[in-house]
Image (spheres, rainbow, N blue to C red):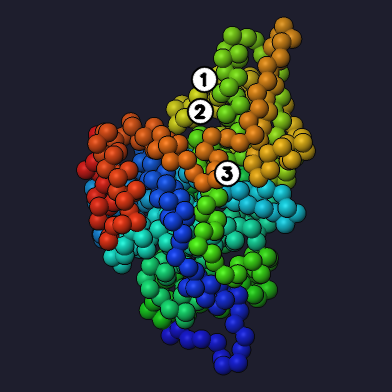
């Protein structure tokens, strides 16, 4: 059964982290507003991703193997227990690479990919439903989850051997433990148990990227919620897991930042939404390509120069040969050359641009062969904290056309723009939901902080609202 360390023994990182989570102040009004907008965006991504083969395979598996329960599965009439709902909704939200992102800071001070903290919103929805918590409780847990996720991401070497979803092994049990009303001892063991199941190799997001990229976080999140359930029953975890050389000490190397007191706002106020279903480092590049589409479609192009900021994360993505020549849907939405080429050709980058394996299309391949990738340090100063891009097209007559995008659509410099979030939600769900169904979801989310439970929201996202 769970017990504290021996008397007189100093608490380790895992104990201090549990204390910091429990002592987190209520989220500010600004953080709650941001959490609602991110919740709406996440639900929209879940509906949009629900028709993808990977998401359908995960839902089919969950429906067949997981027990029934009160938790809604986005777009389905049948409800599941928390573990099944976390897996099913987590895959649907993530599969299109359309959900939110944060930009972290690496050890050398450069912007670094900070992952997708909304991957764990399904944890809050599922556990909040099972434990009959209020909307405000769920939004508070989401805000804490964002902050903890950001801290863990910052403490990792994102170019190393371990993928960023490893952080979810601590985030998911922290969010679940909050909503389960855990005290210090059980939450400490929940975090330790979750961490022990968390490690995910970075190959899931490199090379010939497989479907694992889309479900990696959902698998870790499911294990994290299970860890909280086990700890609630007195099962113990390795309390030295973040400090011992045989634990995760070398993965979360900047541990001193993990246990600092939480604030009422935190990382959630700096989260961004995506305008396009692709990797965050390509959002500005796609926007620039779309600006140049009118010139491109009237001319024979001989060269496309793509200039991005000179950051390690950008170099890492540019130099990944498998991304440059994608062989899968998962690799294509991480491929700068493919994304730029198809946006130039089609004048759009939506789910449709990935249909029929467009990365194999000869016109697309011919254009990608003309793309030259560059980096320029001047972008580092001109658009700090972003992944800016400039494109320069040269046609066969020697004419040059240029576009630059310092901050892409959806980038949040002073909080998310409500109209931008609403527009994206309606755009991605319009093929699936009728107008009244979409408005019911919007209303349920925007009134969520005043809701005594998740009943209204769960009803709105169930299959009965679909076209």
Using the image, tell me which numbered label, if any, was put on residue 346: 1
Q: Position of residue 329 (x, y in %)?
A: 51, 36
Tell me where residue 56 sits by quadrant. top left
Residue at 39%, 32% in the rendered image: 427
Quarter of the image with the C terminus in it: top left
* Left or right: 237 in relation to 402: left
Mark closer to the chain start, 3 or 2:
2
Q: Which residue in the protein does label 2 denote? A: 349
Residue at 58%, 22% in the rendered image: 291
Q: Which residue in the protein does label 3 denote? A: 413
Residue 433 visible (yes or no): yes
Q: Are marks 2 and 1 in contact (CB under 8 Å)?
A: yes
Mark 3: secondary structure: loop
Identify the residue at the far bottom of this view. 7
Residue at 71%, 30% in the rendered image: 307
Q: Nearer the viewer, residue 389 or 432?
A: 389
From the image, state whether disc 3 or disc 2 is nearer to you.
3
Near mark 2 (Cα within 10 A), the count class, few <14, some 14-19 or many ≥20, is many
Q: Position of residue 174 (x, y in %)?
A: 47, 67
* Left or right: 54 in relation to 78: right
* Left or right: 160 in relation to 83: right
Mark closer to the chain start, 1 or 3:
1
């Amino acid at each position: 059964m769970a017990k504290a360390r021996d008397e007189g023994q100093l608490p380790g990182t895992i104990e201090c982290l549990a204390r910091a989570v429990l002592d987190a102040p209520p989220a500010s009004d600004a953080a709650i507003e941001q959490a609602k907008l991110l919740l709406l965006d996440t639900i929209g991504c879940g509906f949009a991703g629900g028709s993808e083969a990977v998401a359908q395979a995960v839902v089919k598996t969950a429906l067949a193997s997981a027990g029934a329960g009160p938790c809604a599965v986005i777009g389905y009439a049948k409800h599941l227990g928390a573990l099944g709902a976390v897996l099913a909704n987590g895959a649907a939200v993530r599969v299109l690479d359309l959900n939110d992102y944060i930009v972290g800071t690496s050890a050398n001070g450069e912007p670094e990919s900070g992952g997708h903290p909304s991957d764990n919103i399904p944890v809050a929805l599922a556990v909040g439903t099972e434990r009959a918590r209020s909307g405000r409780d769920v939004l508070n847990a989401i805000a804490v989850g964002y902050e903890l996720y950001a801290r863990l991401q910052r403490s990792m070497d994102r170019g190393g051997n371990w993928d960023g979803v490893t952080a979810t092994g601590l985030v998911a049990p922290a969010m679940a433990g909050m909503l389960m009303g855990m005290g210090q001892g059980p939450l400490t063991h929940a975090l330790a148990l979750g961490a022990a199941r968390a490690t995910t190799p970075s190959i899931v997001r490199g090379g010939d990227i497989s479907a694992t990229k889309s479900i990696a976080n959902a698998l870790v999140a499911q294990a994290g919620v299970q860890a909280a359930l086990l700890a609630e029953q007195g099962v113990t975890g390795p309390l030295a897991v973040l400090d011992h050389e045989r634990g995760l000490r070398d993965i979360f190397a900047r541990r001193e930042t993990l246990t600092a007191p939480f604030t009422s706002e935190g990382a959630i106020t700096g989260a961004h939404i995506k305008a396009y279903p692709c990797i965050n480092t390509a959002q500005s590049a796609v926007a620039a390509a779309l600006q140049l589409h009118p010139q491109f479609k009237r001319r024979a192009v001989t060269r496309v120069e793509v200039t991005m900021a000179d950051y390690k994360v950008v170099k890492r993505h540019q130099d990944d040969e498998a991304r440059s020549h994608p062989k899968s849907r998962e690799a294509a939405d991480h491929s700068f050359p493919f994304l730029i080429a198809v946006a130039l050709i089609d004048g759009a980058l939506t789910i449709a641009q990935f249909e029929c394996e467009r990365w194999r299309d000869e016109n697309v391949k011919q254009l990608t062969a003309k793309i030259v990738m560059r980096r320029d340090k001047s972008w580092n100063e001109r658009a700090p904290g972003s992944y800016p891009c400039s494109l320069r097209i040269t046609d066969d007559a020697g004419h040059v056309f240029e576009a630059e995008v310092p901050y892409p659509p959806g980038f949040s410099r002073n909080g998310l723009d409500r109209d931008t979030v609403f527009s994206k939600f309606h755009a991605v769900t319009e093929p699936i939901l009728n107008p009244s169904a979409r408005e019911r979801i919007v209303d349920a989310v925007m009134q969520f902080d005043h809701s005594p439970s998740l009943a209204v929201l769960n009803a709105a996202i169930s299959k009965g609202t679909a076209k």
